[in-house]
Image (cartoon, rainbow, N blue to C red):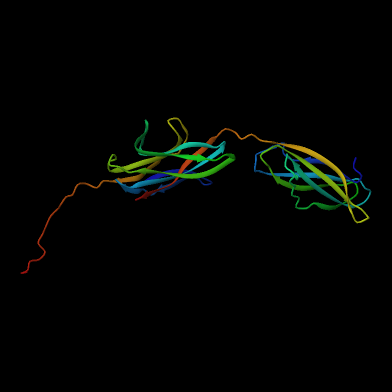
Amino acid sequence: MATYAQITGIVAPSQAYPGSRMDMTVKVKNLYASVISLMVGGALEYGVSPWPGITYPQSGADVAGGSTYTFNGYFYMPDKSVTIHAYSYWYGGDGYWHFDDEMTKVVNLAEVVASQFGSIEIVSYERRL
Amino acid sequence: MGAVFIPSEFGLVFVPLANVQVKAGDKLRITCRYTHRGKAESVPLYAAIGNSGWAGFDEVLNASKTINVPEDAVWQTREDYVDITITTAISAGLYDLYSKIGGSIPKVSSPTLHDVVEVLVTGNSEFGEITINSYAKV
């Protein structure tokens, strides 16, 4: 149960190809009555220790009371299915960030299809001695 | 001079293609662009010189080589080439060109380029005429 920084959702594709960039968002709602600073964090769980992080170009924001802020992030899909583990924090009057809420979402590895060729064209021809 | 029609935002555009002159002993390098997706695969890249007609493509010379295509999660455009050695098996004239990926049942075939290869034949040694240009005491 979140105190002030409630994660209301993680938006990410349900599957991805290895090596592809995965864009995702984490929605965090300010449960406090007035504006406070919220911050998001996250990591990927897939058997690697320490957990690789998720890149958020902007990880913190001042959010009005009752409003939800969407944080954009991304990571590169490994060669295994991953669990996105997102965290939220709020900034207190004591000058510290306080860990608050967490949420997970699984992204499965997309299976690569059988080899297919779509088209071919001759782009040049030249005499070679 | 051959020609190929390619689509554009202006409709069909007539693009004349220059022909290349070759003779026995030369090689003709044919560079192809293809699209691929899916698992890695080793396949033959094949090209042929010949004559395109109502019954298909009558090949005179051809060549192939195995290309190793890596795994592509999404459609990727790649290029590779194959060299056809010009031999005396081909007579003088204008010829067409096409390429494909795969064996007897191709996975994909290119459009034919018409009249783009001109084969020149070097004949036996011949003398046309002789004249005396000068004469002097030596």
Check the picture and name the quadrant holding the N terminus of chain A.
top right
In the rendered structure, the answer to whether residue B135 lies left or right of residue B56 reads left
Q: As displayed, is residue A116 above or below residue A64?
A: above
Q: Is residue A7 visible?
A: no
Residue A107 vs residue B116, the one in the foreground:
A107
Residue B72: give x, y in percent of width and height. Answer: 58, 40
Q: Looking at the picture, how far across and down is residue B37, in whole percent?
A: 57, 38
How many marks overall?
0
Q: Which residue is drawn at the image coordinates 27% and 43% (left, top)?
A: B92
Name the one closer to the observer, B3 or A116: A116
Give residue B38's position: percent from left, percent from top.
57, 36
Quarter holding residue B40: top right
Q: Is residue A121 visible in the rendered structure shown here?
A: yes
Give coordinates of residue B111: x percent, y percent.
44, 39
- Position of B138 with respect to B78 (left or right) is left
Task: Name the residue furthest bottom.
Answer: B137
Q: Residue furthest front?
A: A49
Q: Which residue is nearer to you in this view: B19 or B47?
A: B47
